[in-house]
Image (cartoon, grey):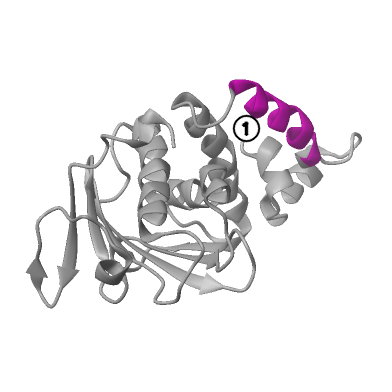
Amino acid sequence: MSRTCRGLITLIFIVSAGMTARPPRLRSEEVSPPGVAMRVEGGEIHITLPDEQLKVSPQDLLEWVKCAAGAVIHYYVHFPVRHLTLQIRASRRNGVSHGVTYAKGGGLITVAMGRGTESNALRNDWVLTHEMIHLAFPSMAENHHWIEEGTSTYVEPVARAEVGQIPVADVWKQFILDMPKGQPAPRASARAAFHFCATRGEVGSAWICRF
């Protein structure tokens, strides 16, 4: 992990039966059932770790969360919400998948972690950063869902590049390849273009329509 990920957390402690321990030496048996609370700039993340054995360690998972939060904090100056509940569950599919953000309880993110996921997949992951960025934007009506995805799709690579997690050149490459996917047909009327933006909730449409 990059140096950016380290030093962002002011306190990490185990939550167990209503008691708070001192900053731990995180061993897998300590973190399995209850969870971990991670205090970041402007908020706190309560993390529920999978109760199944994964290829990555609990320390790897916490470092992954810390890096994602760090990119978001750098971009927005502080974490978007005061309290986030992050539920990580094990899945058969390798890598990070099925990230979903809810407004419940001030902020809830659920995400799946493949049992065979390698640590390098966590270093290259964009999903958790994308979901944390959703916390900074209000939920919209269904026909305006594109702007929710558009904001996260745009900010995520920029935020990660700003803290050195990905090369700036990769961000521009992604923009050049993906932004044109959001354009409606060349001869579409303004009304048709607006309808395209308002109703097509795919990531590609979010690129151009949000501007």
| Helix, strand or loop for disc 1 | loop
Of residue 29 and residue 211, the one placed in the foreground of this image is: 29
Of residue 8 and residue 79, the one placed in the foreground of this image is: 8
- Let me know if residue 45 is in the magenta part: no
**Above or below, comparing residue 54 to residue 161 in the picture:** below
Report the side of 188 relative to 111 (left or right). Answer: right
The residue where tag 1 is placed is 211
Going by the picture, which residue comes out furthest to the top?
A: 169
Give the image quarter of residue 6: top left
Of residue 118 and residue 173, the one placed in the foreground of this image is: 118
Going by the picture, which residue comes out furthest to the right?
A: 187
Please name the amino acid that badge 1 sits on: Phe
Report the side of 71 relative to 143 (left or right). Answer: left
Report the side of 11 relative to 77 (left or right). Answer: left
Q: Where is the N terminus found, in terms of image quarters? A: top left
Residue 125 percent across, percent down from the top left: 55, 47
Report crowding for label 1: few under 14, some 14 to 19, many 20 or more residues within 10 A (C-alpha).
Answer: few
Residue 202 percent across, percent down from the top left: 71, 53
Residue 146 percent across, percent down from the top left: 62, 50
What secondary structure do most residues of the magenta stretch adopt?
A: helix
**Above or below, comparing residue 144 to residue 46 in the picture:** above
**Above or below, comparing residue 44 to residue 14 in the picture:** above
Residue 46 percent across, percent down from the top left: 27, 61
Q: Where is the C terminus found, in terms of image quarters? A: top right
**Above or below, comparing residue 206 to residue 25 in the picture:** above
- Let me know if residue 174 is in the magenta part: yes
Magenta range: 168-181
Give the image quarter of residue 25: bottom left
Give the image quarter of residue 22: bottom left
Which residue: 70% across, 32% down? Answer: 174
